[in-house]
Image (spheres, rainbow, N blue to C red):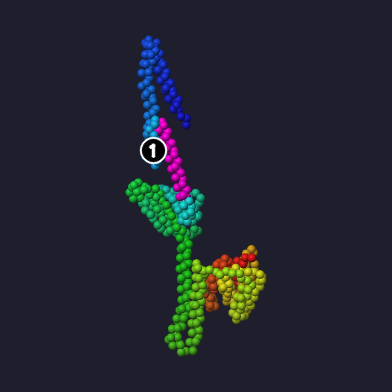
Amino acid sequence: MKIQYPWKWMSYFIGLLLLFLLIQRMGQIFFKFSFLLSSLIGLSIIIPLAYLLVRSITRPISHLTQKATQWVSDHLATPNRIGPTDELQKLSRAFDEIEIQFRTKMDEISKERDSLRTILRGMSEGVLFVDEKGRILVANDALRQFLSLPPTVAKRTPLEIIRNAELEEAIQKVLREGKTISFELSLPSPLGKTFEVNVVGIVPSKDEMGAEGEGVRGAIAVFHDKTRLKELEKIRQDFVANVSHELRTPLTTIKGYVETLLEGALKEEVAFQFIQVIKRHTDRLTKIVEDLLTLSKIESKEFQLKREEISAARLMEEVIHLVKGEAERKNIRLSLSEVHPNLFLLGDPYYLEQILINLLDNAIKYTPEGGEIILSVKERPPDEVELSVKDNGIGIPEEDLPRIFERFYRVDKGRSQELGGTGLGLSIVKHLAHAHGGKVWAESQLGKGSTFYLTLPAYPK
Ligand code: ADP
């Protein structure tokens, strides 16, 4: 924009000067006044006109100066440093002051904005800001991740983005009434998540506020992810139900036999058989409780392995020695193949033995008489050793394979119980392998046999 004021005022002053010269000339020519008199007459006409002209210039300036100095003292924190000089200087100082203060304020605002952005980015809770019309202003990184939000969400409504009527309703209610609302939000698959949501209205300071909910400037919804907590709760409930169920069966049997014995069978010949059944079920109860205690010990925070250097070949030979008797009773051949004599593991010998005994116990349990079990040890470069237990037993159906390491999961519950299984052996194996920093998995063919693999860290050379 081109400023025309200087030319405009210049032309007014030139006009006044010309008028003065004209009056002076006319006084001398027409009225024969002396030069001095005609000049005085000219000046007496021109001076009031010049005064009016100057006033029309200075009045808006002085008005502006007054406004600017007033604004500085009303809005800015620092004392007014504008001194009592002329109007234009005052105005210029007022603007300098505004500029300084404005920059300071801008710096403060941008610092606050950066801190807020950092807080939002660092929060593990999801945060959604909406304006007074319920349109999204900001969604932080956590919320974007939780809900897989599209990159641009600004100016859209939560209903469009999150597609949940309950959330939209809560936000609208908060915007209307200014009250805080908390509720549980369950989002169906594929997200399949549960949140505890708190929606709070952004309200003006107390003195600015009118009636209830009046002047709500927007709302903030905070999403706490409760999905994992819910899952854990479900696992805990299932676990308690499973344990109760597992304990009830042997207890009911024991109770039944004890009552029969008390009712008179104690004196009969069958008493011995009954007591043997009671003994078998008591052993089962003891085994379940022992396995449960082992599991809880491994899962506790205090659990620590006593790691040391272990010869893989020697470990295998020792466990073979421990289960040989059981295998021989079923006429099962037990052999060790592919053993590299110089392979050393880093692990706790007591728990590694427990892993292998559990795997071998299963191999013997689920392999019919006359079968074969082969153990092997292989190097897995760069820093792992792989142990395997292969049997040619009944095998595991493909659909059950991913679940056999779960607590109490059994392919054939009747058969497992008959063979003294608790359904906890492989779960213990998995936890112990993980505690060692290793992995365990199985391959199997129904009717042909199964192979269980275990990788463990090699002892550093
Ligand atoms: P269990 O005490 O029932 O043996 P585990 O946790 O040790 O419990 O094993 C879980 C289930 O996996 C078993 O019930 C069985 O169905 C199956 N399983 C484990 N090892 C073998 C194997 N070597 N051959 C066939 N099935 C097996």
**Does residue 260 belong to the magenta stretch?**
no
Q: Main secondary structure of the magenta part?
A: helix
In the image, residue 123 sits, relative to residue 257, either above or below, namely above
Bounds of the magenta segment: 88-117
In the image, residue 236 sits, relative to residue 9, either above or below, namely below
Task: Please give left or right for residue 447 compared with residue 266 in the image.
Answer: right
- Where residue 313 sits, quadrant-wise, is bottom right
- Which residue occupies the extreme top position in the image? 32
- Where residue 393 sits, quadrant-wise, is bottom right
Residue at 37%, 26% in the rendered image = 55
Q: Nearer the viewer, residue 234 or 89?
A: 89
Label 1, residues with CA under 10 Å away: few <14, some 14-19, many ≥20? some
Residue at 47%, 80% in the rendered image = 253
Amino acid type at circle 1 is Asn
Q: Nearer the viewer, residue 337 or 346?
A: 346
**Does residue 101 belong to the magenta stretch?**
yes
Q: Kindly identify which residue carries mark 1.
A: 80
Residue at 38%, 54% in the rendered image = 180
Q: Position of residue 144 (x, y in %)?
A: 49, 53
Q: Position of residue 289 (x, y in %)?
A: 49, 75
Residue at 44%, 24% in the rendered image = 10
Q: Nearer the viewer, residue 120 or 306?
A: 306
